[in-house]
Image (cartoon, rainbow, N blue to C red):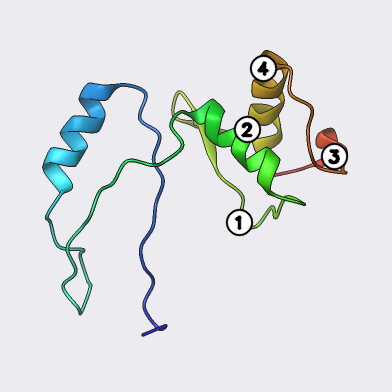
């Protein structure tokens, strides 16, 4: 039924012990307020690490959709997507794929 959201989320943990704890506590639980009583399923992503995901986003998105772009947090505070991308791309020396000026993006 297309009236239900699948409930996808991608979370990048900074360490393995925290990721294991979250999996142990949530796996098999039931989504709150879900009339269908679906079980929470936790799977590792095919692309691992913040840097790898930002590079993949940069290489696969033709133009950034600022309403639906990834949110990036550092030490609990949101940082602009373009800032995180610029840092990763400079570190990896990868050229941005978008035909826009990265400094003009406002997330």
Q: CA distance from mark 4 to mark 1?
A: 25 Å
Q: Are marks 1 and 3 in contact (CB under 8 Å)?
A: no
Question: How many discs mark residues in the rendered view?
Answer: 4
Q: Position of residue 56 (x, y in %)?
A: 60, 38
- Identify the element where label 2 is drawn: helix
| Of the image marks 4 and 1, the number of the one nearer the N terminus | 1
Mark in front: 2 vs 3: 2
| Residue bearing mark 3 | 104
Q: CA distance from mark 4 to mark 3?
A: 22 Å
Q: CA distance from mark 1 to mark 3?
A: 17 Å
Image disc number at residue 68: 1
| Of the image marks 4 and 3, the number of the one nearer the N terminus | 4
Identified at 43% across, 32% down, the residue is: 48
| Of the image marks 1 and 3, the number of the one nearer the N terminus | 1
| Residue bearing mark 2 | 55
| Residue bearing mark 4 | 92
Identified at 16% across, 32% down, the residue is: 21
- Identify the element where label 3 is drawn: helix
| Of the image marks 4 and 2, the number of the one nearer the N terminus | 2
Identified at 64% across, 22% down, the residue is: 88
Q: Quadrant of residue 72?
A: top right
Image disc number at residue 52: none
In the displayed image of the protein, which residue is found farthest to the top?
A: 91
Q: CA distance from mark 4 to mark 2?
A: 9 Å
The front one of 87 and 48 is: 48
Q: CA distance from mark 2 to mark 3?
A: 19 Å
Q: Position of residue 28 (x, y in %)?
A: 12, 55
Mark in front: 4 vs 3: 4
Query: Does 103 appear above or below 42?
Result: above
Q: CA distance from mark 1 to mark 2?
A: 17 Å
């Amino acid at each position: 039924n297309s009236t239900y959201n699948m409930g996808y989320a991608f979370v990048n943990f900074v360490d393995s012990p925290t990721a294991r704890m979250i999996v142990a506590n949530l796996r098999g639980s039931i989504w709150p307020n879900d009339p269908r009583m679906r079980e929470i399923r936790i799977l590792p992503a095919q692309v691992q690490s913040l840097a790898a995901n930002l590079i993949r986003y940069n290489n696969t998105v033709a133009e950034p959709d600022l309403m639906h772009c990834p949110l990036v947090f550092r030490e609990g505070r949101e940082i602009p997507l373009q800032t995180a991308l610029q840092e990763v791309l400079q570190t990896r020396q990868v050229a941005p794929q978008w035909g826009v000026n990265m400094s003009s993006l406002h997330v």
